[in-house]
Image (tube, helix red, strand yellow):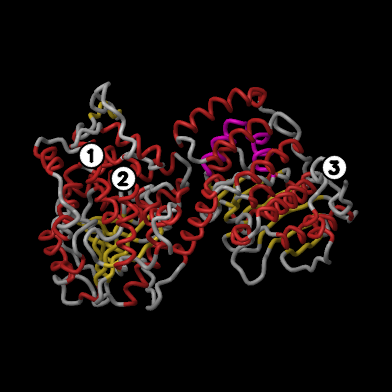
Amino acid sequence: MKTPLLDTKPSVIHDPPHVLESIVHGHPVPAKHFKLDIDHDGIAWLVFDSPKTPVNVWNEETLREFNHNLERVEHDTRVKALVLRSAKERIFVAGADLKAVRCMPHARVNDLIWLGQAVFDRLARLRMPKIAAIHGACMGGGFEVTLACDWRVASDHESTKIGLPETLLGILPAWGGCTRLPRLVGVRKALDLITAGKLLGASAAKHAGLVSHVVAPEHLEMLARRLAREKRPPAPFHFENLFSLLIGRVARKKVLVKTHGLYPSIIKAVDVITHAVRGTVDDGLKLERDAVAELIQNRSTEHLIDLFFKREEANKRPATVGTAIPIHDAAVIGAGVMGGGIAHALASRGVRVLMTDVTNDSLARGMERIHGLVSEATRRRLVSRVQARETLDRVSTAHTPVPLTRQHLVIEAATENMELKRKIFSDLAARVSSDTILATNTSALSVGELAKSVPHPERVIGIHFFNPVHRMPLVEIITLPETSPDVLASAVGFVQKLGKTPVVVKDSPGFLVNRILVPYLMEAVRLHESGVPVKDIDDAMLEFGMPMGPMRLLDEIGLDVAAHVAGTLAAAFPDRFANSNALDQFVAAGRLGKKSGEGFYRYVNDREIPPERPADLPRHESIQNKLALLLSQEAMRCLKEGIAHGAADIDLAMVLGTGYPPFRGGPITFARDAGIIDY
């Protein structure tokens, strides 16, 4: 049955659900989210601007209104071209309204998929040039609507991010993304972008073929006007698409190896993309609908969407009390791996940074690291050459004590040694202003003990970055009873400004992430001491969904660092954190892990070689349950002790800080699903 209002092909809306009929035909559509203007050149400017919200999202209401405007454009003989724009400062379209989707019955989600496909298909079939002028975040359904246009042009603003991240939420692009993207850029590139959920800046998006032009924001309108007068570009042809099934088989094998089959949305995306590109667009849209109808019933999809909300909340949530002070100038004490990484993170987000160390050689190595990080970001088109130069220009260095009265924040990132840090803090107290925030990047040492070294402990806070700083999204903010509310609010706002996710925790041995992680790592070491091979332990946890097994993780951390943190926790909790002699023996023998070439594994040319496994040794099927349970038990202890604000923060911290499998929702959610706890 054909829907007159949508005027779309029967194969797209074939026997549409009753709910879809009511959405399309039920009520008049008020002009609320879109403004349509037709200028003297016959260009229709359709501007998305949802009221009383900083973002534009697709839901039933906005899709209906968008469709109504398409109908007006289609039947207005004055219109020669259509330009889609957003009135938001940093958002084009953020995608579907996930909060609404999460609360919908599955049948209603299916109806929303039908509606979005039909409306975007109507846009695609308009017989006039259609230009999407993208400024700001253009994700998921926001990018899918642009795929129905003839031209996609983007601003070079840092807020412009383009991509299809749906697989990270346990679903896949189902408003034409899996069908139209491989036709635009080829099946290989589409597979890479969609299965990884990549979001690209404007320059990288142009390089990948997602947009045709990148210009300054103030030139978008002029460019759109020029393209509106040009002929619609021909559909691109990609020879590789003829072999999509073969490419898909190879991609499927790689995905299975990488994910151990634990993320069905990625496997399903490979199948849909490689089959959708072979048939008609309508055939592809049906594949998308069927796939989402299956995926939304998975518990793992609910966990992934819930984690998305938890992260969004943490990224925007201000501290409960206190007034945040904007931080434009900061100092980083220490130019090592962490110090250089932190200085780079600050400078790349517009903060002027003074990096200090005791020798010029140390500072030179620190600057070399920063140059390397900036060069890598430029090569990967994450930043422009201009942005790279600006980042480097914001970093200055000093190897002698200098006044720090201009800095709003000083972050100490020295070696994990309490006496050394006390000495640094005592010295800093004499060189900073009365309102400077003093922060330590310690991963395990007591922030309270360090605060005793200064006359104003209310200005002291822990800001614990994870290594490597440029990749790890989590930052633990460690508070003391004395910490000023304004200091806490400033630290939270500062971390959010850096694009990191802050989780506020109490000053307690190991804080949150290391407190939960160490018992898991130490139990893995004890299992190895009892005769379980290294590879068996790691394989068990890879199959659970961890990105790296515990033995390999210990090698990456460094066995000397791990032994130090384990010793700190063993001293604090002697009844539960009995230390293992194995780590001390490895350290004494110079086997420090990857950095020394040997730990639990041997490392040759960046390849890890496990010890030989006796052929007749039985597999230990209980490894996974034992280690996963330890993570959940320690997480629940942290919850009961109030180390973090709640279960949501604990789950989020473990996913972002350790790679705990996000599809399981976090260690507390996993325990709830397993029936271990009820909360």
Residue holding disc 1: 527
Residue holding disc 2: 626
Q: Above or below — where is 422 with respect to 264? A: below
Along the polypeptide, which appears first: circle 1 or circle 2? 1
Q: Are marks 1 and 2 in contact (CB under 8 Å)?
A: yes
Q: CA distance from mark 1 to mark 2?
A: 10 Å
Q: Nearer the viewer, residue 520 or 233?
A: 520
Q: Which residues are magenta?
A: 176-197
Badge 2 marks a residue whose secondary structure is helix
Along the polypeptide, which appears first: circle 3 or circle 2? 3
Residue 344 belongs to magenta span? no
Q: Nearer the viewer, residue 619 or 455?
A: 619
**Looking at the rendering, which quadrant does residue 323 occupy?**
bottom left
Residue holding disc 3: 10
Q: Nearer the viewer, residue 530 or 248?
A: 530
Q: Position of residue 279 (x, y in %)?
A: 74, 30
* Three-letter code, disc 3: Pro
